[in-house]
């Protein structure tokens, strides 16, 4: 009785028609399972005799695994007598997330629940009829109503539409005349008008309305966040936020709603956004659904493993306690990292070098390169968090192999690279490694007039600086310079 009352109150808040008892009122919590999701499809009024495929795409952000497959070769027996074609496949997705299925030139995005069966029916006759009064694509399963509405109405209720006159080029024009308070008032009016129109539309389920309302609230948040920067750039004056500028957003807590879990390409990306946008606006991460806790913990631990850092005992204990369904994929990745590090340490081609922390100024670089005279040298300034740095390290591998024994390679980083991440990553980076102080790292970058990384300095066999690059210039350039 209490649960029914909560649902009724939520429905009333969203303006949902309670008489439609067979419609999904609210979006259920995210579901976790190690069992795969099953997708069963029926294509009605199917006429072709040529075999063809249904394809799907799924990006599991937690495991950084992009899955794409052609499945279910389908064909009809007679081109003159439309019939039903069927297909079926399984996907291991671990938690409720967005999923993309394509048939011919049509793509359908819907939510896929692990461990459950989701059915999709595509009526080709209705699909090609712009005036059809019934949905051409319908679903079965626990999220049937939401998925049917999502495929049919997501475009119509795109969250950018109610705010089109307040964003983009229009925002730049408004920035010339409106104060932040006036712009905010316009946003809130647009939001109220949009939700009123949404609630008056009787075609959708309450679950879909809940989702759309969440996306509208996020759009208000995003526009409130960006407009001060637009105004500052347009007027060339410093802009101070008025008191309570984000008060409504803090009260809404849009990321705490289940609808927001599916407003972005992946549910785990929503958690990242809730943290970054919250810290940038209200000074703390936005609240997120309790059902996301397992995904939050699993994503945090997986990010460490993806950086090549094996999990510590306390982290493994947290994984086991809080991530019953997700732990198997994190543990599998962790075991691979541990094995790789052990192999690298058994066959070391990397060397950690001590360095005097008291050295200052230009004496730092002179001391670094002194042991390497007699061979040309490439000095690489990098950090464990620097994607371009690591991408360049992969690019240079063939050149390092070619110049093995003919040139030296040293790698410099400092405290912005966490020590555990540095120790975990350097076994894959063959060469000599230096972990200098923050002051030394800053002094070196200043010496070479570099404001960013990766930075490269080429030194000849006599210790003379030959070249400096901010960003990797390519193997041919580095080879030529190391050959001088």
Image: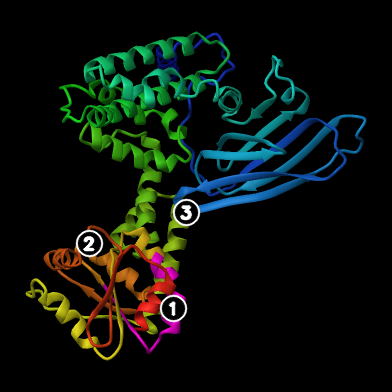
For disc 1, the marked residue is 399
Q: Which numbered disc flags the more N-terminal residue, 2 or 1?
A: 1
Marks 1,3: beta carbons within 8 A: no
Horizontal relation, residue 328 to residue 368: left or right: right
For disc 2, the marked residue is 450
Horizontal relation, residue 452 to residue 153: left or right: left
Horizontal relation, residue 77 to residue 65: left or right: right
Image vertical order of residue 425 relative to residue 31, above or below: below
Q: Position of residue 77 (x, y in %)?
A: 90, 38
Q: Position of residue 64 (x, y in %)?
A: 47, 53
What is the CA distance from the residue labelled 3 to the residue labelled 2? Answer: 35 Å
Q: Residues within 10 Å of mark 3 (few under 14, many from 20)?
A: some
For disc 3, the marked residue is 63
Q: Which numbered disc flags the more N-terminal residue, 3 or 2?
A: 3
Per the image, label 1 sits on a secondary structure element best described as: helix
Q: Nearer the viewer, mark 2 or mark 1?
A: 2
Q: Which colour style is shown?
A: rainbow
Q: Nearer the viewer, mark 3 or mark 2?
A: 2
Residue at image position (35%, 78%) is 481
């Amino acid at each position: 009785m209490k649960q029914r009352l909560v649902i009724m109150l939520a429905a009333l808040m969203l303006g949902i028609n309670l008489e439609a008892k067979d419609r999904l009122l609210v979006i259920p919590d995210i579901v976790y399972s190690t069992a795969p999701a099953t997708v069963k499809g029926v294509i009605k009024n199917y006429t072709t005799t040529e075999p063809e495929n249904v394809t799907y795409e799924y990006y599991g952000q937690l495991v950084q695994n992009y899955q794409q497959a052609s499945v279910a070769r389908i064909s009809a027996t007679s081109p003159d007598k439309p019939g039903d074609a069927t297909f079926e496949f399984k996907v291991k997705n671990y938690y409720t997330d967005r999923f993309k299925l394509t048939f011919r030139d049509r793509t359908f995005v819907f939510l896929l629940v692990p461990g459950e069966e989701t059915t999709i029916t595509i009526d080709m006759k209705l699909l090609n009829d712009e005036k059809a009064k019934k949905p051409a694509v319908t679903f079965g399963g626990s999220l049937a109503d939401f998925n049917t509405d999502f495929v049919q109405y997501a475009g119509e209720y795109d969250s950018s539409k109610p705010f089109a006159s307040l964003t983009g080029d229009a925002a730049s024009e408004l920035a010339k005349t409106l104060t932040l308070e006036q712009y905010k008032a316009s946003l809130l009016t647009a939001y109220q008008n949009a939700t009123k129109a949404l609630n008056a539309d009787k075609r959708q389920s309450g679950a879909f309305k809940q989702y759309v309302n969440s996306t509208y609230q996020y759009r208000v948040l995003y526009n409130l966040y960006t407009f001060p920067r637009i105004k500052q750039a347009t007027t060339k004056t410093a802009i101070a936020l008025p008191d309570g500028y984000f008060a409504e957003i803090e009260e809404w807590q849009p990321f705490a709603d289940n609808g927001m879990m599916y407003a972005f390409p992946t549910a785990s990306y929503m958690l990242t956004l809730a943290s970054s946008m919250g810290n940038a606006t209200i000074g703390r991460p936005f609240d997120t659904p309790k059902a996301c806790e397992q995904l939050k913990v699993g994503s945090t631990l997986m990010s460490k493993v993806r950086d090549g850092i094996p999990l510590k005992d306390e982290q493994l204990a947290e994984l086991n306690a809080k991530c019953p369904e997700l732990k198997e994929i994190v543990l599998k990745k962790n075991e691979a990292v541990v094995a790789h590090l052990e192999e690298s340490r058994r066959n070391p081609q990397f060397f950690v070098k001590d360095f005097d922390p008291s050295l200052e100024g230009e004496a730092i670089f002179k001391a670094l390169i002194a042991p390497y005279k007699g061979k040309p040298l490439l000095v690489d300034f990098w950090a464990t968090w620097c994607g371009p740095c690591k991408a360049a390290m992969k690019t240079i591998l063939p050149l390092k192999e070619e110049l093995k024994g003919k040139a030296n390679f040293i790698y410099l980083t400092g405290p912005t690279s966490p020590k555990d991440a540095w120790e975990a990553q350097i076994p894959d980076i063959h060469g000599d490694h230096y972990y200098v102080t923050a002051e030394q790292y800053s002094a070196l970058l200043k010496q070479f007039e570099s404001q960013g990384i990766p930075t490269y300095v080429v030194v000849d066999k006599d210790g003379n600086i030959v070249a400096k690059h901010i960003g990797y210039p390519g193997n041919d350039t580095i080879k030529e310079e190391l050959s001088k």
